[in-house]
Image (cartoon, rainbow, N blue to C red):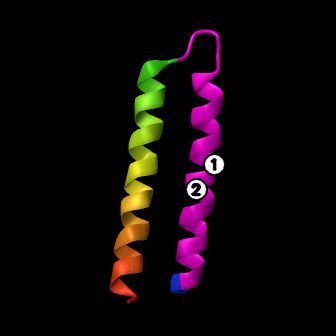
Amino acid sequence: MSLHDRVESLKAKHAALELALDDETHRPLPDHTQIHDLKRKKLRIKDELNRIGSSSH
């Protein structure tokens, strides 16, 4: 997998997590554990994207 493909894959996963997070927060009874897990996953992806971006410059 090329670096570009990896970045695009991470961005797609981040966007999917954002949608899932939005869905969960707008439910009548949101699961706060699920929200926390989704936010943690998004942060890990963002950190990885930042590492990739800083290492490619």
Q: Where is residue 53 in the image (x, y as percent from the top left)?
A: 41, 78
* Total numbered labels placed on residues in the image: 2
Type of the residue with mark 2: Lys
Q: Does the magenta stretch include residue 18?
A: yes
In the figure, residue 23 lies in which quadrant?
A: top right
Extreme-bottom residue of the structure: 57
Q: Is residue 16 magenta?
A: yes
Q: Position of residue 35 (x, y in %)?
A: 47, 29
> Where 42 falls versus 3 (above or below)?
above
In the figure, residue 20 lies in which quadrant?
A: top right
Placement of the C terminus among the 4 image quadrants: bottom left
Q: Can residue 1 be seen from the camera position used here?
A: no
| Label 1: element kind | helix
Q: Can residue 47 be seen from the camera position used here?
A: yes
Residue at point 58%, 10% (across, down): 29
Residue at point 60%, 26% (across, down): 24
Residue at point 50%, 18% (across, down): 31
Residues 50 and 3: in front is 50
Q: Name the residue under label 2.
A: 13
In the figure, residue 21 lies in which quadrant?
A: top right
Discs 1, 2 touching: Cβ within 8 Å:
yes
Residues 52 and 2: in front is 52
Between the C-alphas of marks 1 and 2, the distance is: 5 Å
Q: Is residue 17 left or right of residue 43?
A: right
Q: Position of residue 22 (x, y in %)?
A: 62, 33
Q: Name the residue under label 1.
A: 16
Type of the residue with mark 1: Ala
Q: Where is residue 39 in the image (x, y as percent from the top left)?
A: 44, 39
> Where 8 falls versus 37 (above or below)?
below
Number of other residues with Cα within 10 Å of mark 1, as a class: few under 14, some 14 to 19, many 20 or more? few
Magenta stretch in the rendered image: 4-30
> Where 18 falls versus 51 (above or below)?
above
